[in-house]
Image (cartoon, rainbow, N blue to C red):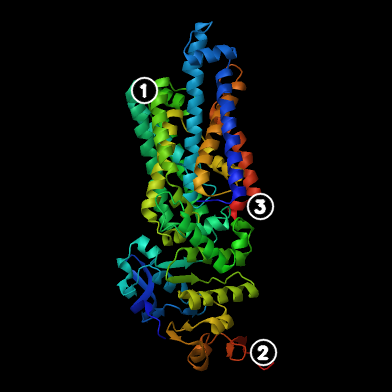
Amino acid sequence: MSEPVILTTRGLTAGYRSGRKATPVLSGLNLDLRRGEMVSLLGSNGIGKSTLLRTLTGVQYPLAGTIEIDRRPITDYTVRQLARTLGIVYTDRTLAGALTVEELVGLGRHPYTGFFGRLDSDDRRIVARAMERVGISHKRGDHLARLSDGERQKAMIAKALAQQTPIIIMDEPTAFLDAASRIETMSLLRDLADDDNKAILLSTHDIAPAIDLSHRLWIVKADRTLIAGSPDELTARPDGLPSLFDGRGVAFDPAARDFKALRHKSR
Amino acid sequence: MKLCAPHNRRHRIALAVMAAALLAIIPACLLAGSVDIPFTQVVKALAGHATDNPRWSVIVIEMRLPMALTATLAGAALALSGLLLQTTFDNPLAGPSILGISTGASLGVAVVLLALGGSVTGVGYYAGILTGAAAGAAAVMLTLLAFSMMVTSTAMLLIIGIMMGYLASSAISLLNFFSTREGVHSFVVWGLGSFSSLTLERLAVFAALTLALTACALLMAKPLNALLLGQRYAENLGVNIPATRNRLLLISGGLTAVVTAFCGPIGFIGLIVPHIARMALRTSNHSVLLPGTALCGAVVGSGCALVSVIFGSGGIIPVNAITPVIGVPIIIYIIINRKKLLYFN
């Protein structure tokens, strides 16, 4: 891939530290994230996907190793610089239901606005374009509480776009969405990588759309090793996707690009 | 932040209604009372002219006016304090009284008054209770802050706040039990909770402090809006969480401490007014919600003062006997309807 690498980790160990006791979750990670690529992070619940994402976003300190964004250690960034470099979308419930879509997306301009957070005409244009980009403009005056889960997620993605960061990292952006919204959201993310040259990293449990739409996959296997590769490569490798849920009673079905129950595989 | 036209209109109407209510209640506070004073005489007294009965001028200028203004300022201050706490702790049921901050401030005052045994008066008295209230409020807030790092559930943190309040109450009872009669008397007088105990000079000090802290609160709209999305989003938007949180707690605690020092512990206003303001304005956008909450708090505070006089049959009902009557039904309404309320979803 010709696009430049924007985020790199070398010898990264992600995990928790409480007092003097360190609990590594994922270790020895040498990862690269490029502009213009969408990477899906796959793995079972509790395997450490969120821990890794929190570490990559600078919320949690790594136990070992380095993270660099644009060849600069993430620890050198101020909070405000990082806010202009790396946008985040979670599925957390918020108390922001009485904000309108436009107000929420406007919060994405937070790292650029002055003391009072007032938006100038440039900011408003960026906000309008972000809403347009994700297809939520028609709901701009609606309160977040009145949106469907899929619409709310779009609004959150628009917020991240208004932040104008080269990297967007999302923790399960498709959780709680119905099948149509899941695929729609993932397609939108792919477009943002292709057309807007964003580096997009998301964790997800939606295997088939992740295979179809991602440029690359990072998969965390049961033994907590992480393998990176293209969807084609990882679906073909026996130690790739097919071994993702080893010993859990499911098998990978390449035709469906998804996992099926072992007992009913013959049907 | 530019808003869509229909929201803008709603905000303007709601704010105008609140302002009109305030402009109706304050004159009513000057008219109402055990002594009947004609409207024209009240105006005369306010203008500084001699009234037909010289006592009327004293009553209006030195009793009714300070009470109306104290209640207005205290209501606004407590309401803002509550809003700051609700957004900072990401918990719509937070408030200065429920988190034990008012009780902490009371404990601080109790320590000062009972230790000094009712011997101080004048400036020393107010400096003493202000220091005591600020120290007490700060102690409770620091404890809450420490627990908020260990306890992630906001409901649990609320319960810790309530427990802190009980602990402070118990300490107050113990202090009362072991102190002198004079000390107990001055503390009991202070602790009734009242808007009516300030002289004009003390009102000036009270107004300066509350207005300064109110101005600080109004300047926090930007980080407060980011905090609406929760701590993790706020941090990603460039908010320095520890510094911002400390600043917000300092302002909120300061507002509660000042009101508690001058008026005694007053419950419910800080908890309910932010909700009334959110429902009236239909927004959580702090650029609108902060001034709206301050204004609404002023209305509720002065309204309580008016009620305490009108139904006082010659006397003044303690404020804390009125606020729960208004507050409890509103809180129950909010809890029952939380699925329908915008800002809970």
Tell whether label 3 touches label 1 (CB within 8 Å): no
Place of residue B100 in the rendered image (x, y in percent of width and height, measured from the top left): 46, 42
Residue behind mark 1: B118
A39 to A86, vertically: above or below: below
Mark 1–mark 3 Cα distance, whole angstroms, equals: 51 Å
For the residue pair B108 and B229, the one nearer the viewer reads as B229
The secondary structure type at the circle numbered 3 is: loop
Residue B216, by quadrant, is top left
The reply, left or right, for residue B33 in relation to residue B78 is right
Place of residue B55 in the rendered image (x, y in percent of width and height, measured from the top left): 50, 8
Mark 2–mark 3 Cα distance, whole angstroms, equals: 44 Å
Question: Which residue shows up at 33% across the image and 26% down it?
Answer: B116
Question: Which residue shows up at 46% across the image and 79% down it?
Answer: A37
Is disc 1 in the same subunit as disc 3?
Answer: yes
Circle 2 or circle 3, nearest the eye: 3
Residue A85, by quadrant, is bottom left
Chain ID at mark 1: B
For the residue pair A235 and B137, the one nearer the viewer reads as A235
Residue behind mark 3: B340
Circle 1 or circle 2, nearest the eye: 2
Place of residue A183 in the rendered image (x, y in percent of width and height, measured from the top left): 60, 76
For the residue pair A167 and A17, the one nearer the viewer reads as A167
Residue lying farthest to the right in this orientation: A267
Residue B313, by quadrant, is top right
Give the residue type that dot 1 points to: Gly
The secondary structure type at the circle numbered 2 is: loop
Circle 1 or circle 3, nearest the eye: 3
Residue behind mark 2: A264
B191 to A109, vertically: above or below: above
Mark toward the start of the polypeptide (1 vs 3): 1
Tell whether label 2 touches label 1 (CB within 8 Å): no
Give the residue type that dot 2 points to: His
